[in-house]
Image (spheres, rainbow, N blue to C red):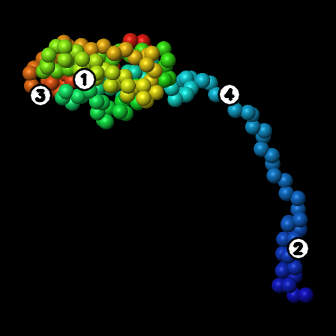
């Protein structure tokens, strides 16, 4: 047997023996169970709380505007009313007063009636979105409490409204 063959034979035996050798893998130390998380904040259950009235954008919006001589809630206010309706569902003790307003055009009596119809329209939209009638009160101020006392289209647009006032959070 020549040296090259011997070297190959020795190498083959060495590889074979090393393949048969029992390998031991050191065991990792047993991990300690993780400590229970400490509750540092309330669990978010998806429900609104009183603090949300001042922090959540849709709940901070509390004015619904109307077109001239109309008492129909405009589509752009539906999402805001749905947000307030959810708040009412989440907080059964909450109460809202819906203050209806009109611009200065029209008689005092007509504007009081228009403010009431506008308040009732917002009340209906809140109830349709899940709010409870027992949580809602409608009051009309007609033209008596304008936001802008000027006599122009800009002022009238500001004054045709229903304001959402939380009387109990």
- Mark with earlier residue (3, 2): 2
- In the image, which is nearer the foreground, mark 3 or mark 4? 3
- In the image, which is nearer the foreground, mark 3 or mark 2? 3
Q: Say whether residue 155 is left or right of residue 24.
A: left
- Mark with earlier residue (4, 2): 2
Q: Dividing the image into 4 quarters, which one contains the C terminus?
A: top left
Q: Residues within 10 Å of mark 4 (few under 14, many from 20)?
A: few
Which residue: 21% across, 24% down? 160
Q: Residues within 10 Å of mark 2 (few under 14, many from 20)?
A: few
Q: Secondary structure at mark 4?
A: loop
Which residue: 19% across, 14% down? 109
When asked about the image quadrant of residue 126, the answer is top left
The reply to whether residue 156 is visible in this rendering is yes
When asked about the image quadrant of residue 63, the answer is top left
Location of residue 75 with respect to 56 vertically, above or below? below
Q: CA distance from mark 2 to mark 1?
A: 96 Å
Taking the view exactly as shown, the residue that stands out farthest to the right is 1
Residue identifier under label 1:
161
Q: CA distance from mark 3 to mark 2?
A: 102 Å
Q: CA distance from mark 4 to mark 2?
A: 55 Å
Q: Say whether residue 91 is left or right of residue 37.
A: left
Measuring from the top left, give residue 132's x and y in whole percent: 46, 21
The reply to whether residue 55 is visible in this rendering is no
Q: Residues within 10 Å of mark 1 (few under 14, many from 20)?
A: many
Q: CA distance from mark 4 to mark 1?
A: 52 Å
Any mark on residue 153, and which? 3
Q: Residues within 10 Å of mark 3 (few under 14, many from 20)?
A: few
Which one is nearer the viewer's eye here, 69 or 148?
Answer: 69
């Amino acid at each position: 047997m020549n040296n090259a063959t011997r070297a190959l034979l020795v190498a083959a035996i060495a590889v074979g023996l090393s393949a048969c050798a029992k390998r031991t893998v050191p065991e990792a130390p047993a991990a300690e169970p993780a400590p229970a998380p400490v509750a540092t904040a309330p669990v978010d259950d998806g429900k609104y709380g009183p603090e949300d009235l001042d922090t959540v954008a849709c709940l901070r919006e509390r004015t619904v505007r109307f077109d001239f001589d109309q008492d129909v809630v405009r589509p752009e206010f539906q999402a805001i009313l749905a947000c307030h309706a959810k708040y009412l569902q989440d907080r059964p003790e909450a109460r809202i007063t819906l203050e209806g307003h009109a611009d200065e055009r029209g008689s005092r009596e007509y504007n009081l009636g228009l403010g009431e119809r506008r308040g009732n329209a917002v009340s209906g939209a809140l109830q349709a979105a899940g709010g409870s009638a027992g949580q809602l009160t409608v009051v009309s101020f007609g033209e008596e409490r304008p936001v802008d006392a000027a006599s122009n289209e800009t002022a009238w647009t500001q004054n045709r409204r229903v304001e959402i006032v939380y009387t109990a959070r």
